[in-house]
Image (spheres, grey):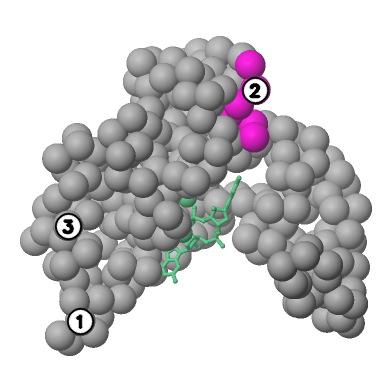
Amino acid sequence: HDAREVGTGISFYSAASDDAHRRAYQILAALPLALAGNQLHLHFQPRIALESGACVAAEALVRWDHPELGVISPLEFIPLIEQTALIGTLTDWVIENALSSVVKLRSAGHDLRISVNVSPVSTAEAGFDRRLLRHCADRNLPASAIELEFTEGALLAHAKRTFSNLETLRAAGMAVAIDDFGSGYSNLAYLDQLPANVLKIDRTFMSSIRRPGGSDYLLRQMIDIGHTLGFRICAEGVETVNAYRYLQDLGCEEGQGFYMAAPMRFEHFTRWLQSVPSYG
Ligand code: C2E
Ligand code: MG
Ligand code: MG
Ligand code: MG
């Protein structure tokens, strides 16, 4: 990242970029072992129906605890792994673990769905739809127990092959969400055509709520457009009671954020579910 690039595509040597490359290489080299061993686990973050305050879903977020490098953020290792064939192994691992978690939750009486972040590199594979539906059926899970989250840009970049897979999954009742909506170059013309039914509004839009006098018209417009197009809307990054109440007033269906709960280990999440506090 630190290599200074010029229009010709030539990049100059810099020590910082050398370090970054070394770390990237170290991470990539360690991934097969992390996937085979038990260095990866999932955290779960509650998604709350703003009107009732009930926990209706949880987002599964991968965590990597490296023995020497410490906790490595998915923001760092996902983009690296996406450039390799290992992304398929990671996606399978995440889905496998998310499915067995939702089975445990449902048998404990918690009727919620789990959302997973999937790389469109994986969903572009032929047969992704059939395999995922078979995994659900094998566990007696309805497809509606799972939601797939994609960023808009990623989805469009792989449009041709992901769309038909996602359309099959949508038809089977699985939820599909556009993640981080508004954070990239949102294309409103395409929004209508995406095989998705949930819009997750990026947390950057929540800052206007925090600032007194901050302009929140973008947030209001996004919620209106989303509703017009028939999306269920989930706001990301709900960090304050003010934000919660404000979103509730705007008719936003769901919220997720540190105000309600941070992502937590499965055991912690199941305990948290025993006594969901009241919000708003
Ligand atoms: P994301 O899907 O947008 O996930 C939400 C991120 O926001 C999470 O970061 C979460 O910890 C953080 N967050 C939640 N509530 C708040 C809040 O109130 N305030 C703030 N400031 N942040 C909040 P995390 O866990 O570091 O994940 C980062 C990204 O990594 C995810 O963004 C997702 O794109 C990707 N990712 C995570 N797990 C997986 C995975 O299993 N597979 C793939 N392909 N990508 C993943
Ligand atoms: Mg997500
Ligand atoms: Mg997100
Ligand atoms: Mg995000």
In-front residue for pair 63/230: 230
Amino acid carrying mark 1 in the image: Gly
Q: Position of residue 36 (x, y in %)?
A: 84, 41
Q: Residue furthest bottom?
A: 212
Name which residue lies at 53% across and 24% down.
160
Q: Position of residue 35 (x, y in %)?
A: 79, 43
Quadrant of res 21: bottom right
Q: Position of residue 173 (x, y in %)?
A: 35, 20
> Label 2 belongs to which residue?
125
Name which residue lies at 83% across and 62% down.
24
| Camera sees residue 106 | no
Which quadrant holds the C terminus? bottom left
**Range drawn in magenta:** 121-126
Q: Kindly identify which numbered label has been placed on residue 214.
A: 1
Which quadrant holds the N terminus? bottom right
First of labels 2, 3 by sequence position = 2
Amino acid carrying mark 3 in the image: Gln
Q: Which structural element holds mark 2?
A: loop
Callout in the foreground (2, 3): 3
| Camera sees residue 181 | yes
Crowding at dot 3, Cα within 10 Å, few <14 / some 14-19 / many 20+, comes out as few
Per the model, the C-alpha gap separating discs 3 and 1 is 15 Å
Q: Which structural element holds mark 3?
A: helix
In-front residue for pair 267/172: 172
> Label 3 belongs to which residue?
221
User: Marks 2 and 3: CB-CB under 8 Å?
Assistant: no
Amino acid carrying mark 2 in the image: Glu
Q: Is residue 163 above or below residue 239?
A: above
